[in-house]
Image: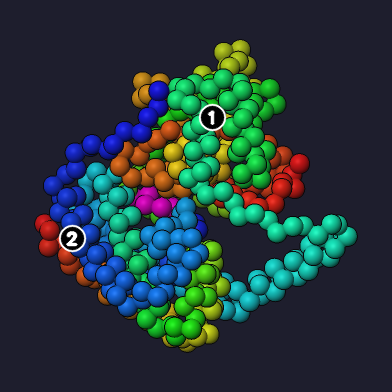
Amino acid sequence: MLTKKKNTAQKSPGFIKIEKVIKKRHKDVKDRFDKKHKKTKRFFKKHGKAFEDIRTAGAIALSTAAIAGAIATTPSVTAEQIKAEEQTDKEDTKVEEKAKKTKTPPSVPPAPEPKEEFAKKIQDIIAGSPTLNSDQEKALADLLSDRFNIKAAAELEGNRLNTTYGLIGGEQHLPRYPGDTATEHYNNDDIYPQITGITPSTGAWGHFAPSHDALTEDLRLKEQHYVAVQTFLAPGWNIRSKELYQWFRYRKMVVVNTQTGDACVAVIGDAGPSTSTGKSFGGSAEVMIHLKLSTGSRKGPVLIYFVNDSEDKVPLGPIEAKYEKPHLF
Amino acid sequence: MKNPIFFSHLVDSEKLILEIERLLEIETERQEILEMIDSVLRHAIVTKILDELDGKHHEEFVERYTTKPTDRNILVFLREKVPDIEDKLREEAKGVQQKLFDDIKNTK
């Protein structure tokens, strides 16, 4: 049975010292905020958030000179560029509104269910089972589909993984092209590549691109948001391995932290982990951050479902609850 | 940077990140410390924004920030109210990070 265990891993003396000074500095900052902006703190509560909760998946303050420099010289951060984008958005909205005028005016959409309640629903369906039966899988597929406005499925085109529920662990970056390095990942704005490192060999499907120049934004995002799954344990692998090998490549998945409700859309980018690890899935650094599993033991229980998205409309990355009913159906 | 908070580009943390990497060998510990630093920076920057922004605009800022912290239009909004806000936030981030760097360096 998968249960949340308290992280009792021993921390190094260096970590303990550094943690102590950071906490002190953080307290100073918080005290200053509380003292100077008591009234404003109430505004946060009014909007249903404690200040500490403002942390969308992947919204990071830390940056580096390479990234800061690049963005500072990139026209897109000027007000003119942002305003131009706003104008485009406004025009798009006008088109949508014109289309909607022919339909029944929608009622005010309800606020999405808090993540905690969503996570509780997941746990109620799982009910402590180490594996899921077909009723549970279906109920969870419906829950995910409804929550995220996607088509989530345990089985797609007759294919499925060995499991849709299990432990995920953090993985390293994968070489995207011959000669790719951790520094290159860093230059491409990957999160902490020097820390997670890069694997010495390629993933199960080789390099994502034949060269640095051939690495498109699409492929870069695929490597940035990849999961490893145990393709070698998938039903039918022994007799259809060649076919399934191609089928699983970059297959779009939705991964959900069953304890927090955090979710991320990713692609299958590698095969693994080994069954000896006790884990069923692996996640890239970005995926683990979006799932809130990037600290401590860097592992936790997740659901992982196919995303039926033949038109490739669902973007990779963190996924939040949606108000509207799906347009994909 | 994927999904950066709206002021990420004003924060240069290279020196801090490298120092953490130098001091900590375990990757999980590095990540944990960097996430803590991230929290400190966010708190400090938002406090600075509220310091500089007239009180009558605070609620609108909070609404925008809580709705979508990655929205770059928040910076456009702030610039309209405080023309040199980016310079001020850059300096604030630099100051906070230098303090953190000195604190951390002294732990060795």
Magenta highlight: main SS: loop
Residue A192 is covered by the magenta coloring: yes
Give the residue pinned by disc 1. A125
Give the residue pinned by disc 2. A21
Instruction: Please report the bounds of the magenta region as a residue range.
Output: A188-194
Q: Residue at x 59, y 26 (%)?
A: A137
| Badge 1: residue crowd in 10 Å (few <14, some 14–19, many ≥20) | some
Q: Is residue A194 above or below residue A245?
A: below
Quadrant position of the C terminus of chain A in the picture: top right
Between B21 and A101, which is closer to the camera in this rendering? A101
Query: Which amino acid is tagged 1?
Result: Ile
Quadrant position of the N terminus of chain A in the picture: top left
Between A248 and A156, which is closer to the camera in this rendering? A156
Between A214 and A138, which is closer to the camera in this rendering? A138
Q: Residue at x 40, y 83 (%)?
A: B52
Q: Which mark is residue B59?
A: none
- Residue that protrudes farthest toward the top in the picture: A239
Query: Which amino acid is tagged 2?
Result: Val
